Amino acid sequence: MIFEERMNPLGIEPDRFTVATDEQGRLLGFGQLEPKDGCFELRSMVVDASHRRQGIGRKVLRRLLEEAAGQEVVMTTITSRIPFYAAEGFERLQLKDVPRFLLFEVVAGTAVARIAAGEELVVLRRRADR
């Protein structure tokens, strides 16, 4: 699923995954939280293309946010996905506010996002007090 979706394969840690499966145990979607400098980075969120728009991604995201309760969560994504995350309290960060550990990914990922998805890479944050 990672390569099919042209996701960044770096930092994938299956032990940290929250997964969604169907009754037969088939993988429908997943996401992970990576601990970083006093916050979490939300990474590798994806739902199988044939199962999108059924609430699976929202359930995975909410479960991950429960795990991160009381902690700030940051992430990179593309502009078309902002509404999905904004509905759960994420807001877009300006470049000057991007956490230091994400700066390289933002710089490198900006070109890749434009080529792979034809969109801008953005950084979103969900504050700890949500």
Image (cartoon, rainbow, N blue to C red):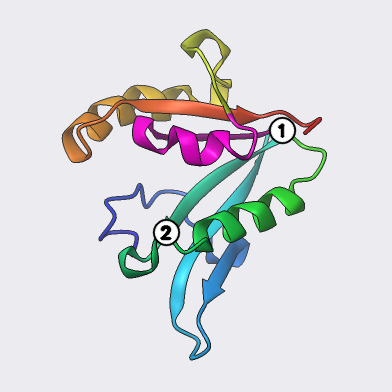
- Please state if 63 lies on the left or on the right of 49 as rendered: right
- The residue located at (77%, 34%) in the rendering is 130
Say what amino acid the circle numbered 2 marks.
Answer: Arg
Extent of the magenta region: 72-90
Could you tell whether 73 is left or right of 28 in the image?
Answer: right
Mark 1 Cα-neighbour bin, 10 Å: few <14, some 14–19, many ≥20: some
Above or below for 68 versus 22:
above
Query: Residue at position x 37%, y 52% from top?
Result: 9
Q: Is residue 20 above or below residue 129?
A: below
Q: Judge by depth and name the residue closer to the eye, 53 or 27.
A: 53
Residue furthest to the top: 96
- In space, the residues marked 2 and 1 are separated at their CA atoms by 26 Å
Residue at image mark 2: 53
* Residues under numbered marks 2 and 1 in contact, where contact means CB atoms less than 8 Å apart: no
Residue plotted at (60% across, 60% down): 59
| Among the 4 quarters of the image, the one containing residue 112 | top left
Q: Quadrant of residue 41?
A: top right
- Give the residue pinned by disc 1: 72
Identify the residue at image location x=42%, y=59%.
Answer: 53
Name the one closer to the observer, 104 or 109. Answer: 109
Mark closest to the chain's N terminus, 2 or 1? 2
Percent across and percent down for residue 124 are 53, 28
Quarter of the image with the N terminus in it = bottom left
Residue 102, image x, y percentages: 50, 27
